[in-house]
Image (tube, grey):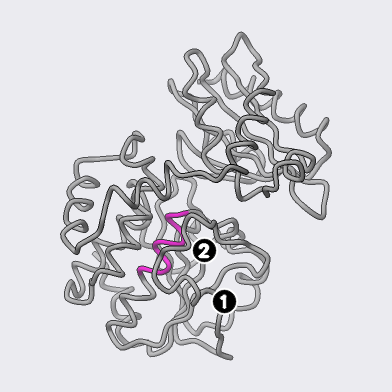
């Protein structure tokens, strides 16, 4: 199944791994899992994300997190994008500069809206990119999987499956998770760290934002906003908004939940979309050049708040009517 990319990997001596902008647990987990796995195979490996992108504090326990953006070379034998549905998802710095410094390319991704941008795209519609990587690693050289690799893979699977509660969790997902636990991972501790634990600052942001939630179209659409003032008064930033939108989609009657987070330095908003009851969040995001999965996706809108809300409500009506 992985013959072409396997040949590239085993012939390469220097490998660069690229994450997407605003990297989540699956992205960071899959990148660092690949980093450790390839190093165990004797490869020289480097990991990159956009310079201004912060790695979430809750992922700081992952082994070799400090390796991200720490070193670079002038050229690489192979560049691998992980959890990236398109070249633009890597950001301008990675896609236009570093990725082009690689003699060959490949990508591992699991997004339903994936747009192939390399010759070798390993794609499966599964819980996470980490789930794909586990299968790849086992098929090629399972002996190179150690505690560090397993911890990174398990963490990515936990975050993208909502601790195995989302609809993307399959029998195979749980089977792989159980195998990874055999490497000595404390599964409970990982789930607590990346899903349940939150700082007092994030709790304040969550309380402030949810109190201002607005509902439209007979309660089928719920929208929360995170403005610069909210971040300043709670000591948080846009990266701290992850997961808060799930509180809205979990409300009975809500089919489409949208989070609108004001970005720094420009009139733009990061949009998170969650859905249920047959509403396609991925299609919603694609209306604005974004993408993701059927029930979870995201995009960015470059406009002021009033225009952004108008665009989102028009799109919501369109998506609901076609659901």
Q: Is residue 164 magenta?
A: no
The quarter of the picture where residue 150 lies is bottom left
Name the dominant secondary structure of the magenta segment.
helix
User: Which residue: 51% across, 28% down?
Assistant: 247
Image quarter of residue 233: top right
Label ID, residue 69? 1
How crowded is the residue under tag 1: few (<14 C-alpha within 10 Å), some, or many (20+)?
A: some
Q: Quadrant of the N terminus?
A: bottom left
Does residue 30 show up magenta in the picture?
A: yes
**Residue 117 locus on image (x, y percent):** 52, 63
Q: Which residues are magenta?
A: 25-33
* Camera-side residue of 196 and 98: 196
Question: Would residue 60 be found to the left or right of residue 305 on screen?
Answer: left
Instruction: Determine the residue positioned at 40% across, 52% down.
Output: 110
Q: Which residue is mark 2?
A: 117
Cα distance, mark 2 to mark 1?
A: 23 Å
Q: Position of residue 10 (x, y in %)?
A: 30, 84
In the rendered view, would you say 310 is above or below 191? above
* Residue 206 position within the rendered picture, expressed as x and y whole percent measured from the top left: 60, 34
320 or 174, nearer to the observer: 174
Indicate the quadrant where residue 170 lies: top left
């Amino acid at each position: 199944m992985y013959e072409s990319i396997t040949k590239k990997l085993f012939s390469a001596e220097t490998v660069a791994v690229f994450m997407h902008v605003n990297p989540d647990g699956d992205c960071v987990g899959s990148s660092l899992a690949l980093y450790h796995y390839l190093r165990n195979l004797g490869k020289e490996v480097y990991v990159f994300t956009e310079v201004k992108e912060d790695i979430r504090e809750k992922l700081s326990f992952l082994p070799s997190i400090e390796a991200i953006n720490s070193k670079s070379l002038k050229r690489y034998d192979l560049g691998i994008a992980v959890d990236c549905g398109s070249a633009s998802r890597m950001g301008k710095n990675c896609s236009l500069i570093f990725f082009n410094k690689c003699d060959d390319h490949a990508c591992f991704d699991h997004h339903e809206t994936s747009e192939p941008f390399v010759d070798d795209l390993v794609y499966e519609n599964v819980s996470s990119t980490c789930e794909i990587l586990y299968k790849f690693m086992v098929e090629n050289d399972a002996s190179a999987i150690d505690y560090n690799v397993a911890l990174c893979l398990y963490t990515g699977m936990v975050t993208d499956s909502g601790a195995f509660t989302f609809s993307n969790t399959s029998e195979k997902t749980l089977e792989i998770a159980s195998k990874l636990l055999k490497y000595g991972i404390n599964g409970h501790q990982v789930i607590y760290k990346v899903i349940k634990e939150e700082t007092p600052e994030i709790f304040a942001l969550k309380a402030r934002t949810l109190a201002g939630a607005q509902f439209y179209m007979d309660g089928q659409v719920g929208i929360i906003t995170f403005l610069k003032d909210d971040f300043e008064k709670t000591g948080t930033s846009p990266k701290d908004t992850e997961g808060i939108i799930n509180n809205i989609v979990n409300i009975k009657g809500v089919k489409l939940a949208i989070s609108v987070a004001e970005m720094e330095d420009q009139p733009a908003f990061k949009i998170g979309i969650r859905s249920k009851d047959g509403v396609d969040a991925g299609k919603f995001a694609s209306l604005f050049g974004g993408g993701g999965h059927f029930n979870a996706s995201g995009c960015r809108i470059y406009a002021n708040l009033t225009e952004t809300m108008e665009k989102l409500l028009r799109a919501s009506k369109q998506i609901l009517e076609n659901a």
